[in-house]
Amino acid sequence: MLTAALAPLLEPRDPQAQDITLRLKPPGFADATGGVFWLGTDGLGRDVLSRLIEGTRVSLLVGLGGATLSAVLGTSLGLTAGYAGGWLDALIMRVVDTWQAIPFTVLAIAVVVILGPSLTNVILVLGVSSWVNYARVVRGETLSLRRGEIVLAARVVGATPLRVVANHLLPQVSASVIVLSSLLVASMILFEASLSFLGLGVQPPIPSWGNMVLDGVEPIRVAWWVSFFPGLAILLTVMGINLFGDGLRDAFDPRLRLTLSSPPR
């Protein structure tokens, strides 16, 4: 996150500047002016390190943006289903079941093909495609909380359903939402890289880790560094966020581990 925030200060060169005379130079290469390309250059002579740093911004933007959109949509539907009950609960949960039956990758690719590949569309697609876990977890907690003394007391004094949900239910399910979001950010980054690798994600010249890996596929035998370093960045970032999410899950509520890891029946 610090790298993304300080990217303009950390980038040694313009990440989009091309120099065909410097194409596919190895890590540590020094040009005529004495400037060192610490991670080498790609097929268009662009500095891999600068593009890797700039790609951090894109990956975190996609991860945080997609997770936020999913959290808002899934939490709203989960609270509505759990508190309202009845036919509305049944309708929302049938939508959840249907949505969950569609493979996520297939759904994301189909929507991106229809809307067109761009940074905004990738965030929109990933956010809209990943709300079902929020809806299930939040609905389950709301069902147990709506019969609690606090909710009953609020209803007795005349609080509207919207006020009950906003003031008494939402704060109590927020811990689960935060934990789910921390775990989902890593998945969002990974799926963005997958879509970009397929040419359906963030489009050049905007650098993202996925399209950087794609840039290194063709010259992989003579320039391994073009794909290796963005792939390593994806690996370390996803692993770090997952470990952070595990820590949050245990800190907030160890019981949530069973909810998230239990196999479907």
Image (tube, rainbow, N blue to C red):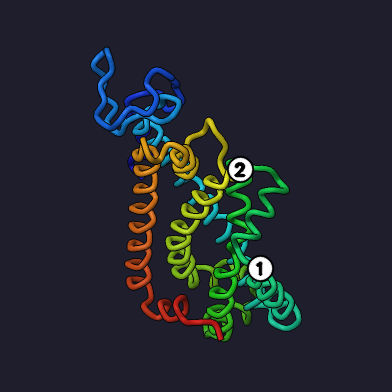
In-image side of 94 versus 205 (left or right): right
Whether residue 232 is visible, yes or no, is yes
- Above or below — where is 206 with respect to 89? above
Q: Nearer the viewer, residue 231 or 260?
A: 231
In-image side of 60 versus 139 (left or right): left
Q: x, y percentage for residue 202?
A: 56, 41
- Above or below — where is 103 with respect to 241? below
- Above or below — where is 124 with respect to 248? above
Q: Amino acid at mark 2?
A: Thr
The residue located at (68%, 43%) in the rendering is: 116
Q: Nearer the viewer, residue 123 or 15?
A: 15
Cα separation between marks 2 and 1: 22 Å
In-image side of 110 versus 58 (left or right): right
The residue located at (58%, 75%) in the rendering is: 136
The residue located at (37%, 29%) in the rendering is: 24
The residue located at (47%, 52%) in the rendering is: 189
Q: Nearer the viewer, residue 235 or 76?
A: 235
Q: Which residue is mark 2?
A: 120
Q: x, y percentage for residue 124?
A: 62, 50
The dot on residue 102 is 1
Q: Amino acid at mark 1?
A: Ile
In-image side of 234 versus 191 (left or right): left
Q: x, y percentage for residue 170?
A: 54, 68
